[in-house]
Image: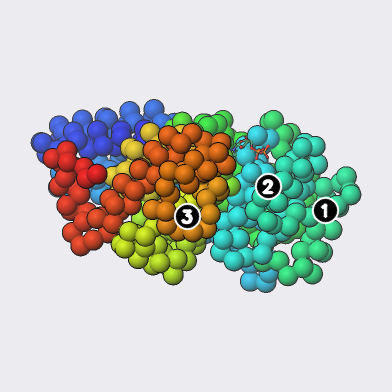
Amino acid sequence: MFETLSSGFRSAINKIRFSDDEKALDKALDELKKTLLKNDVYHKATKEILQKTKEQTKLNGIGRDSFLNSLSKSLLDILEVGGVYGFTYAKKPPTTILMSGLQGSGKTTTCAKLANYLKSRNKKVLLVPCDLQRLAAVTQLKTLGEQIETEVFNSDSKDPIMVAKEAMKYGESGQFDVVIYDTAGRLAIDDSLMLELSEIKKVLQPHDTFYVADALSGQDGVRTAQAFHEKIGITGVILSKFDSDSKGGIALSIAYQIGIPLRFMGMGEKIADLDLFMPDRIVSRLMGAGDLTGLAEKTAAIINPKEAKDIHKKIKKGTFTFTDFLNQIENVKKMGSVSSLMSMIPGMGNMAKSLKNVDLDNSEEIKIIRAMVNSMTPKEREDPSLLNGSRRKRIALGSGLQVSDINRTLKQFDQASKLAKKLSQKGGVQNFLGMLSQNKIPH
Ligand code: GDP
């Protein structure tokens, strides 16, 4: 993600923190240069960023804020290339998307991620497997389709162009909003791959041709994207594996060298881990200011306002139950990985790295709660105070847990709901922060 770039920017900005003369500016620019080059930003793009930042900072008077604004603006200038951002729809449905990229770049996964993104916005999507090179690709897409309850086109044909033609007919008659075609990749560019893609593209006349670029591929990846663009013409780039220890600079390099807008970024292996790529929001994240608009959009697509209100009421009254808790975990899971959510909150970017391995599916605590709740009666789920000694023993037996696990979990849940109740009251957050600063966390 952006931690290395962000922390490099912070140290550059800090060079002008206490003195605001040209010498300080030069030191800040030196630090900035090191950061950009270390993060694989193309040297010409680096030069442009440095030059613009220097000029603008001097124009507005050397100082921390002026440096910060000038840097934001020069980054935005690089990232904002002509073209459209986000997902756009064809005037007449279905919107046809051709997905291209090298083998292993994350193309098939990205097809499913995009379908899921559109589905959560109430669109009907058809996935079409045209990758007939890699036998497992069709099965992989089918499995992913099942997981997100999205139809995957079925064909007996062994010719990807035939499959595309059949799917096109089906897509038009089936009232789909969007049809996404997964195509074959290779380990490296070769002529037969390009020919196949060009032919499919000719048949489909897609609304958008996306290229999936592995964020870990560095300058090699940029060159390959360039070759795809020259041979088949792409209209958008999706940066996959941006959650990995990638040097965030690839985003700047792709925009600068290819001039094609980045449209989405893959932020993890899970289906929900796909974020919109909007240049101004990315710059905001790069500068450590988070992306609250993006977070609000994600939340709105997943959680309905009535549910959010009901939950808030329950927390306030202290009647939040285990079932509510598990439902909320499911909601959070639909929004993507915990670390990618944290990186959207201002000032929390640094925490994202330490939360990288938080896995809501496999966390021991959540597994225990799930097992425990499954062994409870509906009444017990709504009112944990019913759980006396003999009920706890029964639940332990039913769930394969120890009574001590049940006792500990119930106690923790009770403490957490008391704390949430306190926080939800007027002035609660301020009081809590006050207590934290004095090391007095309520029990
Ligand atoms: P394809 O050959 O291009 O279709 O690639 P796949 O879709 O099969 O993906 C290759 C591998 O990359 C799989 O293990 C995916 O789980 C993984 N992958 C795809 N996108 C991401 C991502 O955004 N983050 C991470 N960490 N892994 C990803």
The local secondary structure at tag 1 comes to loop
Q: Amino acid under label 3?
A: Glu
User: Which corner quadrant holds the C terminus?
Assistant: top left
Residue 382 picture location, percent across and down: 45, 58
In the picture of the structure, the residue carrying the numbered disc 3 is 380
- Residue at 30% over, 40% down: 51
> Pointer 2: what residue?
144
Residue 307 versus residue 67: which sits nearer the camera?
307
Residue drawn at (80%, 58%) of the image? 167
- Please report whichever mark, 1 or 2, sits nearer to the chain's N-terminal start: 2
Q: On the picture, is 193 further left or further right than 433?
A: right
**SS type, badge 2:** helix
- Counting from the top left corner in percent of width and height, residue 368 is at 49, 39
Whether 105 is drawn above or below 413: the answer is above
> Which numbered disc, 3 or 1, marks the residue closer to the eye?
3
Spatial CA span between label 3 and label 1 = 46 Å
Taking the image as four quarters, which one is ligand 1 found in? top right
Could you tell me if residue 113 is visible in this image?
A: yes
Q: Position of residue 48 (x, y in %)?
A: 36, 40
Dot 2 beta carbon under 8 Å from ligand 1: no
Q: Nearer the viewer, residue 8 or 357?
A: 357
Q: Secondary structure at mark 3?
A: helix
Q: Amino acid at mark 1?
A: Asn
Q: Which residue is at 33% across, 52% downward?
A: 417
Mark 1 is surrounded, within 10 Å at the Cα level, by few (under 14), some (14 to 19) or many (20 or more) other residues, namely some
- Give the labeled residue for mark 1: 154
Extreme residue in the front direction:
390
Q: Give amino acid for label 2.
A: Leu
Q: Find residue 46 and report its horizontal and vertical position in percent.
A: 38, 36
Q: CA distance from mark 3 to mark 2?
A: 36 Å
Cα separation between marks 1 and 2: 14 Å
